[in-house]
Amino acid sequence: MVDSIEKRVQQALDDIRPQIQMDGGDVELVAVEGSTVKVRLVGHCACCPMSQITLKNGIETHIKAVVPEIQTVEAV
């Protein structure tokens, strides 16, 4: 079941990746631990002062819509 959730999370990230890359950034899946997804923001996203807004309002919102089992997304 974890593989299934991880695969769906990866697909959700792939869905929104083009929008993130348009601003010179990217996001990598680090781990799925229970109902928490850990991601790494790279490129411009790594040092952007708006990265937390992107993380919560963009990435987390989309992942939770696609994979309802997920409760939170954290940057590591």
Image: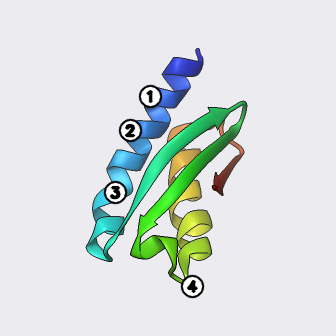
User: Which amino acid type corresponds to the residue marked 4 in the rendered image?
Assistant: Pro
Count of numbered tags: 4
Q: Give the labeled residue for mark 3.
A: 17
The earlier-in-sequence mark between 4 and 2 is 2
Query: Secondary structure beneath disc 4?
Result: loop
Q: Quadrant of the N terminus?
A: top right
Residue 70, horizontal then vertical, whole percent: 66, 39
Q: Residue furthest top?
A: 1
User: Which amino acid type corresponds to the residue marked 1 in the rendered image?
Assistant: Lys
The residue carrying pointer 3 sits among few (fewer than 14), some (14 to 19) or many (20 or more) residues within 10 Å by Cα, namely: some
> Which of the labelled discs sits on residue 31, or is there none?
none
- The answer to whether residue 62 is above or below residue 23 is above
Which quadrant of the structure image shows residue 71?
A: top right
Q: Quadrant of the C terminus?
A: bottom right
Q: What residue do we see at 43% from left, 64% from top?
A: 42
Query: Secondary structure beneath disc 1?
Result: helix
Query: Secondary structure beneath disc 3?
Result: helix
Q: Are marks 1 and 2 in contact (CB under 8 Å)?
A: yes
User: Which amino acid type corresponds to the residue marked 3 in the rendered image?
Assistant: Arg
Q: What residue do we see at 51% from left, 65% from top?
A: 58
Q: Are marks 1 and 4 in contact (CB under 8 Å)?
A: no
Query: Secondary structure beneath disc 2?
Result: helix
Task: State the CA–CA distance, disc 3 to disc 1.
Answer: 15 Å
Q: Give the labeled residue for mark 4.
A: 49
Q: Give the labeled residue for mark 2.
A: 11
The earlier-in-sequence mark between 3 and 1 is 1
- The answer to whether residue 8 is above or below residue 63 is above
User: Which amino acid type corresponds to the residue marked 2 in the rendered image?
Assistant: Gln
Residue 12, horizontal then vertical, whole percent: 42, 44
Indicate how the structure is coloured in the image. Answer: rainbow
> Which of the labelled discs sits on residue 7, or is there none?
1
